Image (spheres, rainbow, N blue to C red):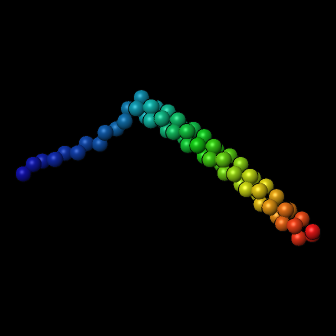
Amino acid sequence: MRDYRYERNVPTAALRKARQAFKEADVKVAMAEYERTQKAFHANHERLKAERLARDAKAARKLKT
């Protein structure tokens, strides 16, 4: 029978600092991606809204004549 011992590895101060730096970098990348996605969504939404309004205006003019 084997005797297994598991020791908890306590991170050093340098390791904790490195992890924090990587975490901050990941957050910045995620936020930039989110903002880029939101800008694209809003631009597409505005484009579709303009197309819909133009289509509705054209239909309204067609009904008047």
Query: Is residue 11 visible in the rendered structure shown here?
Result: yes
Q: Is residue 40 above or below residue 22?
A: below
Seen at 55% across and 39% down, the residue is: 29
Image side of residue 64 versus residue 45, left or right: right
Q: Residue furthest left?
A: 1
Q: Residue furthest right?
A: 65
Q: Residue furthest top?
A: 14
Residue 41 placed where, x, y %? 66, 51
Between 2 and 29, the one lying in front of the other is: 29
The number of callouts visible is 0
Seen at 6% across and 51% down, the residue is: 1
Q: Residue furthest bottom?
A: 63
Query: Is residue 31 visible in the rendered structure shown here?
Result: no
Between 60 and 15, the one lying in front of the other is: 60
In the picture, which quadrant includes the C terminus? bottom right
Seen at 52% across and 35% down, the residue is: 25
Q: Is residue 12 above or below residue 1?
A: above
Residue 57 placed where, x, y %? 86, 62
Image side of residue 11 versus residue 55, left or right: left
Residue 61 placed where, x, y %? 89, 65
Residue 24 placed where, x, y %? 53, 37
Image side of residue 9 versus residue 58, left or right: left
Seen at 69% across and 51% down, the residue is: 44
